[in-house]
């Protein structure tokens, strides 16, 4: 597992899916857990830079090639803005496509 995830508590780590088998050094979570991860990270001072969406069904995990990103030049509080954008994207994606997806989260300390 990528060292960047060591800041997350065990319960969030255990809810995640390791994507290393796909050649990706990331983790991904179902929507409700992804929102918890985003909240935790934002509260700890991390900026949510973006994320990717993956299908997760009986055939396994695969990329949808859908994603979002946050432009670091946006005004206001970059942490809160990036959190809001991630929440909006995930909630809208679930509303439009259902809840059988995983979301990876790219973040860095502000």
Image (cartoon, helix red, strand yellow):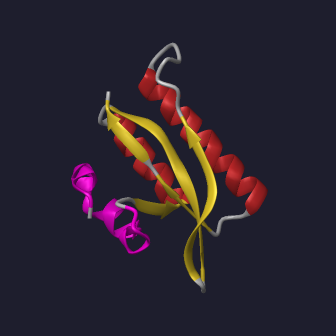
Which quarter shows the C terminus? Answer: top left
Q: Quadrant of residue 88?
A: top right
Q: Is residue 108 above or below residue 74?
A: below
Q: Is residue 7 magenta?
A: yes
**Residue at (44%, 45%) from the top-left corner?**
38
Q: Which residues are magenta?
A: 2-24
Most common SS among magenta residues: helix
Give the left or right position of residue 54, taking residue 33 as reference: right
Q: Is residue 14 magenta?
A: yes
In this rendering, the count of numbered labels is: 0
Which quarter shows the N terminus? Answer: bottom left
Where residue 63 sits in the image (x, y, percent)? 58, 64
Residue positioned most to the top: 75
Residue positioned most to the bottom: 58
Give the left or right position of residue 67, taking residue 50 as reference: right
Q: Quadrant of residue 46?
A: top left
Where residue 75 sits in the image (x, y, percent)? 52, 13
Q: Quadrant of residue 95?
A: bottom right
Residue positioned most to the right: 96
**Residue at (72%, 64%) from the top-left corner?**
98
Q: Is residue 68 above or below residue 25?
A: above
**Residue at (58%, 35%) from the top-left corner?**
85
**Residue at (32%, 63%) from the top-left corner?**
13
Where residue 60 sits in the image (x, y, percent)? 55, 81
Q: Is residue 88 above or below residue 33?
A: above
Give the left or right position of residue 69, taking residue 72 as reference: right
Where residue 28 sits in the image (x, y, percent)? 45, 61
């Amino acid at each position: 597992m990528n060292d960047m995830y060591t800041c997350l508590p065990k319960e969030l780590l255990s809810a995640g899916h390791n994507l290393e088998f796909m050649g990706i050094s990331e983790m991904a979570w179902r929507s409700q857990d992804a929102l918890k991860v985003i909240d935790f990270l934002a509260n700890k001072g991390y900026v949510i830079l973006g994320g990717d969406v993956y299908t997760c069904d009986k055939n396994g995990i695969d990329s949808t090639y859908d994603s979002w990103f946050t432009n670091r030049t946006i005004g206001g509080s970059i942490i809160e803005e990036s959190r809001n954008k991630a929440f909006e994207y995930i909630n809208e994606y679930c509303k439009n496509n259902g809840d059988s997806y995983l979301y990876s989260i790219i973040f860095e300390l502000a």
